Amino acid sequence: MIKSNLAVDINHATIRFNMASESIFSIKEYFVKLVKGQLMFQEFFALQDVSLQVEKGDSWGFVGTNGAGKSTLLKLVCGILKPFEGTAQVYGSIAPLIELGAGFDPEMTARENVFLNGAILGHTKKFMQEHLDEIIDFAELREFLDVPIKNFSSGMTARLGFSIATMVQPEILIVDEILAVGDYAFQQKCHMRMEKMLSGGTTLLFVSHSVDQVKTLCKHALWLEKGRVVMSGKSAEVCDAYIASKQ
Amino acid sequence: MNRVIQWVRNFLKYKDLFAQLVIRDIKLKYRRSFLGYLWSVLNPLFTMLIMWVVFSNLFRFDIQYFPVYLLTGQILFGFMSEATNASMLSITGNAGLLKKTYIPKYIFTVSRVTSSLVNLLLSMIALIIVTLITGVPITWRMLWFLVPIIQLYFFCVGLGLFLAQGSVFFRDLQYIWSVIITAWMYITPIFYPISIMPEQLQSLIKFCNPMYAYIAQFRDCILYGVPSGPNLYIAGIGWAMIMMTAGIWSFVKNQDRFILYI
């Protein structure tokens, strides 16, 4: 495979986590853990030996049960987590929608958050100024422009987040089931925008519990179980195998 | 060399974020308070008044323009204390952002110190008022006030980076730090003249207490209108460089492990 065609290149990545468990019941146990160095750090492997090559313009869906490592994989792609072993390379600009309200400050108003969030994505203030109207209109939040985000409903926050992240066409769009909270009409709007981006050459990485969504949006799929890859390939095949295993 | 260029390019990419974070800190600090930014002026003024009443009645030090003497020391020390306390919590306090988006982490720490600097510049208004009231002679030297402040800013950035990375792994640091700040305040000549100390202790303070170097330089230009001696510059710039080196080194070394502990 030619390197320049890849958007994401992950080779045998392992991610180590800190469980930070606080189940210490006695002073003796405290000292035993202190000596072993487990007091503040208890390791846990969220991903083990995962490899993934995503070509530019491709769309991948990640399926698996809760705690399978889907979101961890997305965080690895974003550069938030560094691999403990193995390598992870990303080529191109990323628009991450990892979680509801990522990159928002709850105390600040919607307008201020648009600028803060835009700056996190690497846009200039002038650029955001020009696109403010477009963002607010897409999110349908014009009346709430000067209300602090902490008073927003989760659906409103998600709408604003999606609208900012997809304002410009990123090279890689990362979506982690935030669409589940929007109402039906907004979900349709998001779908249309994502499909438009896909046809425009954006690479999509998508996590959802709705296998149907993965099937319609993604060409390929990766099935994770307890941090390991069970199956990867065409989305229809992987999704069917995943559904079959759960029944 | 390549790494430095890369670093500068990366910083330029995020300079708008840096500005946004500084504005956020300043805006949120006084949001929903009636007097707002005026508190940045009133706070040091009131603290100075209390200290002035206490120290000019209880303990008498023979210091000319005592209110200005107090305020100069107190503004700089207050800045250091505010900046280090804020930057210590800059990584743990922004855990939500750091877990969900990729941003160079030092930006949070440096922006906290910078927003404290803006606060310091606002409280300079209080200093101007008190200077005019007490009749301190106005000289061109006063314009040099930025020189010690710039040194102190870099000192605080270095110290802030060091504390920020330390408190990620060792949360107890925040409680220890408030004790250290209190002790530090008493060994810094803020409300007493350094001449009341024993001879040997004086020279120790002059070289080992960076706050002395900054406050003394600041007073030289505001209060006495004279150029500072070379020793003060050596101590001031030297400490700033030591702190920057220690801060950057420890921060860069540990930053990839932050995510596991926040």
Image (cartoon, rainbow, N blue to C red):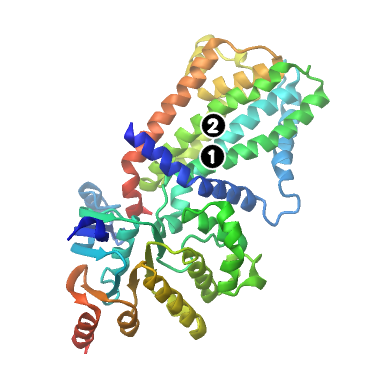
Which residue, given by chain and number where applicable, does mark 2 sit on? B153
Q: Is residue B152 left or right of residue A142?
A: left
Position of the C terminus of chain B by quadrant: bottom left
Element at label 1: helix
CB contact under 8 Å: marks 1 and 2: yes
Which residue, given by chain and number where applicable, does mark 1 sit on? B113
Q: Is residue A114 left or right of residue A99?
A: right
Front residue (pair B239, B16): B16
User: Looking at numbered disc 2 in the image, what kind of residue is underneath it?
Assistant: Tyr
**Label 2 neighbour load within 10 Å: few <14, some 14-19, many 20+:** many
Residue at 66% across, 35% down: B121
Residue at 29% across, 64% down: A56
Position of the N terminus of chain B by quadrant: top left
Horizontal and vertical percent position of residue A33: 23, 52
Residue at 49% across, 18% down: B235
Chain letter of mark 2 equals: B
Horizontal and vertical percent position of residue A115: 56, 57
Residue at 49% across, 79% down: A189
User: Looking at numbered disc 1 in the image, what kind of residue is underneath it?
Assistant: Val
Element at label 2: helix
Q: Is residue B25 left or right of residue A97?
A: right
